[in-house]
Image (spheres, rainbow, N blue to C red):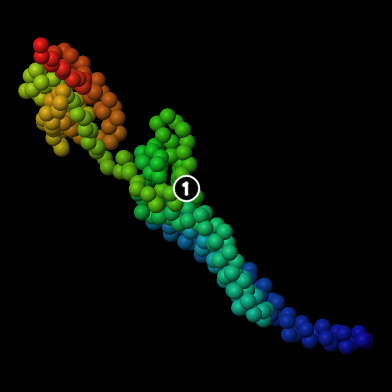
Amino acid sequence: MDISKYLDMVLIYMSQYGLKVIAAILIFFVGKWAVEKLTALSKRVMIKAKVDNTLVEFAESIIYFSLLVVVILSSLNALGINTTSFLAIIGAASLAVGLALKDSLSNIGSAVLIIVFRPFKVGDFIEAAGASGTVEDINLFSTTISPADNRTIIVPNSSITSSNITNFSKKSTRRISHTFGIGYGDDLKLAKETLMQIMLNDERILSEPAPFVAVSELADSSVNFVFRAWTKTEDYWDVYFDTLEIVKLTFDEKGISIPYPQLDVHTQK
């Protein structure tokens, strides 16, 4: 083959495919630039709308890679490559990856539900999936919970959303409930007045809803009072434990007994 014919073939190929290659390159780089701008814009919109940071990062990645796939397919199509087969391959690969990462994707979906519907947030004291404690972190795969003894429990998000969630920090106030028993020989009215006065003397106990004391049961060995008081959520445990101590000390001062289970046996001669 002489040089002139070779050059003619090169020119023919360049005329046929050169513009397609240039167009494909332009589509890729311009498209990539547009994808970055659109992703940054969507991130700013979500941040302005005060969307949770974890969800912002997750949505940003999804948006970026989804649009980038569209740009790549458009570039290949500009080269004259049939992208139908690529779409089939991507679909099959997505199915395989989805089946392999079924549990991980379930955790990600659960993370989105937690972030969107906010059954709890970092800093809340919750009970979920058999664990109870303060929420330290929420990520795409798991939630970190720290119990009162300072352990670290890492719970998969899917386990949390598939079970009951008790959020003890959701409300600004909580009700303290105790049951106190006195002996049948003790002064019932004095005991009731004493319990009510203990609540009235504690500034941490709220006046609304009003404190409540009433006889709840005539048990086998005691007359039982139900003791209910409302307090701020952050004061709950302090008031809960302080009340037990104060009631015991005050009952001792006033000669009111707190009986323990006992059985009287009477014999006949």
Q: Nearer the viewer, residue 230 or 259?
A: 259
Asked which quadrant contains residue 264, the reply is top left
Compared with 232, 33 (above or below) is below
User: Residue 101: percent from the left, percent from the top?
Assistant: 55, 57
Q: Badge 1: how crowded within 10 Å, few (<14), some, or many (20+)?
A: many
Could you say which quadrant of the image residue 135 lies in? top left
Q: Residue drawn at (88%, 88%), measured in percent from left and top?
A: 5
**Mark 1: amino acid:** Pro
Give the side of residue 262 with respect to residue 114, left or right: left
Q: Residue at x 6, y 23 (%)?
A: 189
Is 34 on the left or on the right of 81, as rendered?
Answer: left
Foreground of the two, 23 or 221: 221
Residue shown at 67%/72% (left/top)? 25
Q: Is residue 195 visible?
A: no
Residue 247: where, in percent of width, then height?
19, 21
Residue 133 spot, x, y in % from top left: 39, 37
Dividing the image into 4 quarters, which one contains the C terminus?
top left
Does residue 218 appear to the left or right of 75 in the view shown? left
- Height in image: 58 above or below 229? below
Percent from the top left, x then y, of residue 231? 23, 33
Q: Residue at x 13, y 31 (%)?
A: 217
- Along the line of sight, which residue is nearer the eye, 72 or 239? 239
Image label count: 1
Q: Residue furthest front?
A: 269
Where, quadrant-wise, is the N terminus in this rendering? bottom right
Instruction: Tell me the residue that label 1 is attached to.
Output: 156
Q: Tell me which corner region of the image, top left, top right, bottom left or bottom right, holds residue 216.
A: top left
